[in-house]
């Protein structure tokens, strides 16, 4: 199987990426992707685009060069409560929001504080993915994270760029193994993302796929291998109060792995 879509990509609008949207789409076509999302950094990241940039996405066609285009944003988590730097008015006009922790935007806290930051972001109804939850500079309680992702129906990312030798993130591979073990145990899906900051990395997920193979991770839990996986990220309605009441208790879900 091969990945069908890549939703975590960046253009020059992010301020520290090097390719245009057109170049990325052409690379996605060459890679054989069916769909591509672009998710430039929100405004708190130094050098990022003004909110007007995201607000004008209405001019971009839904299909370009036979690639289905989805319009997203990578929001920055700002505090341990999980607040993000994307207002609801803007988020409602986008196809999806990735929420991520970035060092320029928040200081690392304890594992409990960092985990609560991600969990709080998941409770935002517009957040559909958690980006690169794998960096030991921001230690996490992975059981709590997986439980929250299951409850909130938010996809956890396996970020290919985290496994590159040049990454500044720390212990990503070891943390990914822990995350995948828990997701496999509790049947929680993951989503691969290239986190491409230049055109030739669009759809590049070979390092992530090698880790999935090493872990014998179920392919049905990898959203990118099924077009239905897009529905998990793009077409969900926020949980109702009744759904939340009837979701499994933490004591039920969190068992020894």
Image: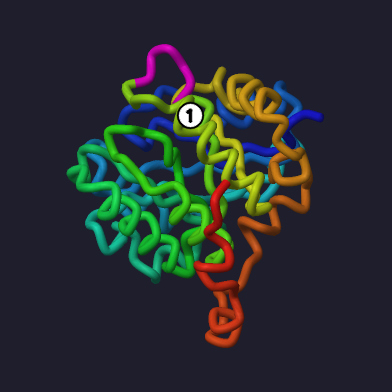
Q: Residue 10: image x %, image y %?
A: 46, 34
Residue sitting at x 37%, y 55% = 118
Indicate whether 91 appears above or below 31: below
Q: Is 80 covered by the magenta stretch? A: no
Q: Is residue 251 left or right of residue 212?
A: left
**Magenta extent:** 162-167
Residue sitting at x 62%, y 31% = 25
User: Looking at the rendering, which quadrant does residue 2 occupy?
Assistant: top right
Residue sitting at x 45%, y 33% = 175
Q: Residue 45: image x %, image y %?
A: 26, 42
Q: Residue 65: image x %, image y %?
A: 72, 35
User: Looking at the rendering, which quadrant does residue 135 occupy?
Assistant: top left
Q: Label 1: few (<14), some or many (≥20) within 10 Å? A: some
Q: Is residue 175 left or right of residue 257?
A: left
Q: Nearer the viewer, residue 66 or 230?
A: 230
Indicate whether 98 appears above or below 175: below
Residue 213 in sight: yes
Q: Which residue is mark 1?
A: 20
């Amino acid at each position: 199987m091969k990945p069908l879509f890549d939703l975590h990509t960046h253009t020059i609008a992010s301020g520290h990426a090097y390719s245009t949207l057109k170049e990325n789409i052409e690379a996605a076509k060459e890679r054989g992707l069916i769909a591509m999302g672009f998710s430039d950094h929100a405004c708190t990241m130094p050098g990022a685009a003004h909110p007007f940039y995201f607000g004008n996405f209405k001019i971009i066609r839904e299909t370009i060069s036979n690639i289905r285009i989805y319009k997203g944003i990578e929001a920055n988590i700002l505090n341990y409560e999980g607040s993000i730097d994307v207002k609801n008015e803007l988020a409602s006009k986008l196809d999806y929001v990735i929420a991520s922790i970035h060092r320029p935007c928040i200081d690392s806290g304890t594992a409990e504080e960092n985990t609560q930051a991600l969990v709080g972001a998941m409770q935002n109804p517009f957040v559909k993915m958690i980006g690169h939850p794998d960096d030991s500079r921001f230690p996490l309680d992975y059981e709590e994270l997986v439980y929250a992702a299951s409850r909130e129906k938010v996809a956890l990312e396996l970020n290919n760029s985290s496994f590159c030798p040049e990454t500044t993130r720390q212990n990503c591979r070891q943390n990914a193994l822990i995350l995948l073990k828990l997701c496999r145990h509790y049947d929680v899906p993951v989503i691969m993302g290239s986190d491409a900051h230049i055109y030739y990395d669009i759809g590049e997920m070979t390092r992530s796929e090698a880790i999935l193979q090493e872990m014998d991770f179920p392919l049905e839990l990898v959203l990118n291998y099924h077009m239905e996986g897009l529905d998990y990220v793009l077409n969900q309605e926020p949980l109702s109060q009744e759904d939340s009441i009837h979701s499994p208790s933490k004591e039920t879900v969190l068992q020894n792995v």
